[in-house]
Amino acid sequence: MTQIDFFQIDDNESMLQFACRLIDKAYHRKHKIYIHTESASDSGELDDLLWTFRADRFIPHALRSSGISAPVHIGHEDDPGEHRDLMVNLSGKVPHFFSRFERVTEVVPREDTKRKNARENYKFYKDRGYPLKYYNLKK
């Protein structure tokens, strides 16, 4: 059964900056990662940010729509491709394909409307009996 982890941001770090730190850590632990965003513009913004996130580290990634093979894919559509290891969900909604992954990470941002979405996602997973962990993190 898919393990669901929630990471709550409690400082002024943006959701995408936090996601970059999370992705960096997971990639360097050898995870294959699919990052699910809300829109094409969010996917593009995260793609750009991952190139400049840390000058001393490299995270090989690509937009899912590009067709380029990479251990980290970013997308916002209904098909995460072959990835089955870890999904970082930044979309605010539970994607219908979440259960194909061994782990799902939900990022809980500071903004009230997005926090409300995270609470709804938490309830969705809990009502269906998925194992949940919740982490309150500071930078």
Image: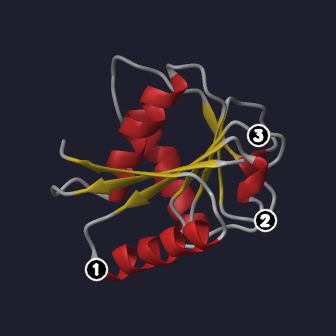
Q: Nearer the viewer, residue 32 or 75?
A: 32
> Mark 1–mark 3 contact, CB under 8 Å?
no
- Which residue is tagged 3? 83
Q: Residue at x 69, y 67 (%)?
A: 95
Residue 38 seen in the current view: no
Q: Amino acid at mark 1?
A: Asp
- SS at circle 3: loop
Looking at the rendered structure, which numbered label has been put on residue 112?
1
Q: Amino acid at mark 2?
A: Asp
Give the vertical position of 129 relative to 35 (above or below). Answer: below
> Mark 1–mark 2 contact, CB under 8 Å?
no
Q: Earlier in the sequence, mark 1 or mark 2?
A: 2
Q: Earlier in the sequence, mark 1 or mark 3?
A: 3
- SS at circle 1: helix
Residue 99 on image: x %, y %: 74, 55
Q: Is residue 52 left or right of residue 127?
A: left
Mark 1 packing: few (<14 Cα in 10 Å), some, or many (20+)? few
Q: Nearer the viewer, residue 14 or 121?
A: 121
Looking at the rendered structure, which numbered label has been put on residue 78?
2
Residue 30 on image: x %, y %: 59, 20
